[in-house]
Amino acid sequence: MLELTGCLDEFAASTHIRVIILAAAGKVFSSGHDLSEMVGRTVGDYRRLFDVCTELMAKIQSIPQPVIAQVQGVATAAGCQLVATCDLAIASDQAAFATPGVKLGLFCTTPMVALSRAVGRKRAMEMLLTGKLIDASTAAEWGLVNRVVPAAELESATRELACKIAEASSFTVALGKQAYYTQIDLDQSKAYAYAKEVMTMNSLAHDAQEGISAFLEKRVACWSGE
């Protein structure tokens, strides 16, 4: 988790990296925490573990580039949290998802935060209380992932989505991502108050003026990232 957070910090500082794809090797995308490291520890150890995990999840949503989870296999517990946290997710038809901590006497309370914001209360509670696996098509229906593709097409489908996002102004994408997470938990009146200020300032940006002009002049926009 520390290594991944460090990588995200490096990527965030780069003006050349437009989109980040989070992928895994092997049959499992992520099974979450290593349970062998969670036996007989002190309260400080447990707090440190979950602090680092929370910092990683916050980092994914705070960096300017969109992060896409490329889910080829099983994602459980904090691994399911990781998918729910990413800005977008494309899943193989062989993927599956669960928050099985309840079966071990350790409720998935930190995964619950991201999961409940992705799939809604009743569906999140079903996953949290039963610990059962849901398949990729159910995950897409519930909103945990954007879409499901055949395993052989997973990488190309994810890259296609990333390239589509990368066509836009990096400034505008970063601004929009930040605004999305800022407004999502506000009540509607506060969300509109915030959003209209962001859109006003966005309108003054070079890339916004260039994009509007390019549209009106029927030409391809030339982004400056400003």
Image: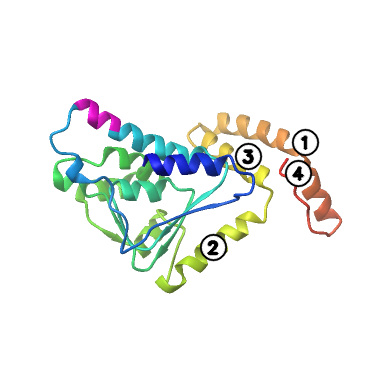
Q: Quadrant of residue 207?
A: top right
Name which quarter of the figure residue 198 lies in: top right
Residue stretch in magenta: 43-48
Under mark 4, the amino acid is: Ala
Q: Nearer the viewer, mark 2 or mark 1?
A: 2
Q: Are marks 1 and 4 in contact (CB under 8 Å)?
A: yes
Q: Sequence order check: which comes first, mark 2 or mark 1? A: 2
**Hey, what amino acid is under mark 3?**
Leu
Q: Which mark is residue 159?
A: 2
Mark 2, Cα crowd under 10 Å, few <14 / some 14-19 / many 20+, is some
Crowding around mark 4 (Cα neighbors within 10 Å: few <14, some 14 to 19, many 20+) is many
Q: Earlier in the sequence, mark 2 or mark 4?
A: 2
Label 1 element class:
helix
Which label was assigned to residue 204?
Answer: 1
Q: Residue at x 78, y 54 (%)?
A: 221
Identify the secondary structure beneath mark 4: helix
